[in-house]
């Protein structure tokens, strides 16, 4: 261990090595765009991209459903009966919930 320290010590006393080392430490931990913040931002970006993909799929699915509802009255009636439990006059409505 002492031998290793003796071989490294002259390099550590060099002002250029100290300056470069201080600069690297500053960039990694103390600057505005430090390493920890960049890791956190990358994680957030990945999560936001996943959410964006999910919402694009939802928009596509809902747009298809809206088109079906606006073009066909039978689909609109089926949707109203299933989602909002609407019924015609003189009809009884039974809701069956499966567990």
Image (spheres, rainbow, N blue to C red):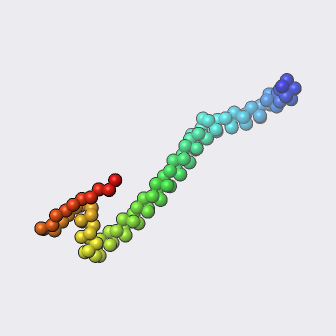
25 relative to 96, above or below: above
Q: Report the quarter where the N terminus lies.
A: top right
- Res 24 seen here: yes
Q: Position of residue 14 (x, y in %)?
A: 80, 31
Q: Position of residue 16 (x, y in %)?
A: 77, 34
Farthest residue to the top: give it. Answer: 2
Q: Quadrant of residue 89?
A: bottom left
Closer to us: 47 or 17? 47
15 relative to 85, above or below: above
Q: Position of residue 25 (x, y in %)?
A: 67, 35
Q: Quadrant of residue 23?
A: top right
Farthest residue to the bottom: give it. Answer: 72
Left or right, 91 with respect to 17, comes to: left
At a point 33% along the width and 72% down the height, the residue shown is: 67
Closer to us: 90 or 15? 90
Q: Position of residue 66 (x, y in %)?
A: 32, 68
At a point 50% along the width and 55% down the height, the residue shown is: 49
At a point 87% along the width and 26% down the height, the residue shown is: 3
96 relative to 28, above or below: below
Q: Quadrant of residue 5?
A: top right
Closer to us: 82 or 10? 82
């Amino acid at each position: 261990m002492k031998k290793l320290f003796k071989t490294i010590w002259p390099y550590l006393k060099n002002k250029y090595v100290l300056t470069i080392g201080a600069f690297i430490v500053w960039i990694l931990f103390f600057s505005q765009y430090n390493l920890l913040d960049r890791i956190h931002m990358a994680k957030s970006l990945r999560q936001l991209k996943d959410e964006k993909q999910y919402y694009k799929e939802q928009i596509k699915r809902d747009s298809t459903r809206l088109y079906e509802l606006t073009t066909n009255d039978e689909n609109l009636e089926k949707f109203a009966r299933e989602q909002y439990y609407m019924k015609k006059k003189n009809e009884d409505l039974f809701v069956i919930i499966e567990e």
